[in-house]
Amino acid sequence: MLASGTVSYGEELSGLCDLGKIGGLVTKAISPEPRRGNQPQRIAETACGMINAIGLANVGLDRFVTDKVPFLQQLDTRVIVNIAGKSIDDYRQVVERLDGIDGIAAYELNLSCPNVKGECMIMGVSPDATREIVSSIRAITGRHLMVKLTPNVTSISTIALAAEEAGADSVSLINTVVGMAVDYRTRKPLLKNVTGGLSGPAIKPIALLNVKRVYEVAGPKKIPIIGQGGISSARDALEFIIAGATAVGVGTALFYDPMVCRKINDGIAGYLERHKVGRLADLVGSMAAALAAIAQAAPGSTRRET
């Protein structure tokens, strides 16, 4: 999937790649009212990635419905609408308006934006708050409900379980990692907001660990995981799937290679053929068996020697 915030509403990328060849597109966050976002400078390049403090800038619900939805309805792929807000009522307002509109496959509840002070990030760091908002939205829609999780918590697994118990159909992880960048010449932060969300290859090891942790508690027969964070190749995607992700999202890599998703799909297909794997689903969480074997063979284990 194309991760939220990296392809706007799809139109910008449609002339560069065939959107029908991808699994899905996640729109920019939509809030009830238009948002200008944070003041510039709000994007900076970092080693192995980028840091942003866009601040959920978006056209607002009314313009999204009139100006963006008609294009999205023409796409031959799944459209997932990312939703953000200051309160549960904000999320409900967006879902209630969109639920009667065709062409939307799912909602991604953004409970974890790290560069908007005092808003959705607060909901995503508390199991109780996560449970409350997911339950509220679950009660008003039958569409697939995905919850976007942050790594900036003590236990991401606890948050994922709370989302599942409240009725979420899947979880996407991870959102960006809180960080900052400094201009050594001016001795000031590069971002006007001071802090922002770090993305790109730099956060891949963190994302992989979080996928593993959630998979360990969610398991293969429970809530599906969409893994994301630094994916830019088929190898990256396969690592996430082996760690426990059912699907993957690509974000920062799209800024320098709009065709990267096609390359990833082709690379995965080649891997399955070379290794004689019949279904991609057979790889999901396959690392768990290897870890179990290592633990069983470790000194002091109860495994009988033969």
Image (cartoon, rainbow, N blue to C red):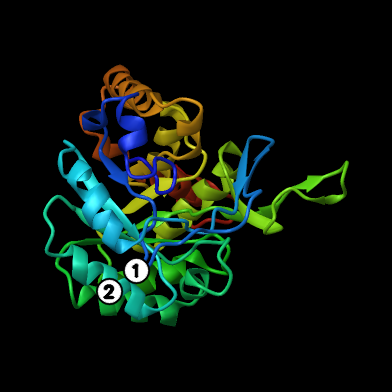
Q: Residue 30: percent from the left, percent from the top?
A: 35, 60
- Neighbourhood count class around disc 2 (C-alpha, 10 Å): few under 14, some 14–19, many 20 upward: some
In the rendered image, the quadrant that contains the N terminus is: top left
Local SS, label 2:
helix
Q: Residue 284: percent from the left, percent from the top?
A: 32, 43
As shown in the figure, which amino acid type bears the numbered disc 2? Gln
Q: Is residue 273 left or right of residue 160?
A: left
Choose the circle earlier in sequence order: 1 or 2.
1
Observer-nearest of 281 and 236: 236
As shown in the figure, which amino acid type bears the numbered disc 1? Pro
- Neighbourhood count class around disc 1 (C-alpha, 10 Å): few under 14, some 14–19, many 20 upward: many
Q: Residue 111: percent from the left, percent from the top?
A: 43, 67
Q: Where, by quadrant of the figure, is residue 34 drawn?
A: bottom left
Q: Residue at x 53, y 68 (%)?
A: 155
Q: Is residue 135 left or right of residue 7?
A: left
Q: Residue 95: percent from the left, percent from the top?
A: 24, 68
Observer-nearest of 280 and 259: 259
Q: Residue at x 47, y 70 (%)?
A: 120
Q: Is residue 220 visible?
A: no
Observer-nearest of 32 and 232: 32
Position above or below: 261 against 54 = above
Local SS, label 1:
loop
Return the residue at label 2. Answer: 93
Position above or below: 5 against 151 = above
In the rendered image, the quadrant that contains the C terminus is: top left
How far is disc 1 from disc 2 in space, using C-alphas?
Answer: 7 Å
Position above or below: 45 against 186 = above
Which label belongs to residue 32? 1
Q: Are marks 1 and 2 in contact (CB under 8 Å)?
A: yes
Which label belongs to residue 271? none
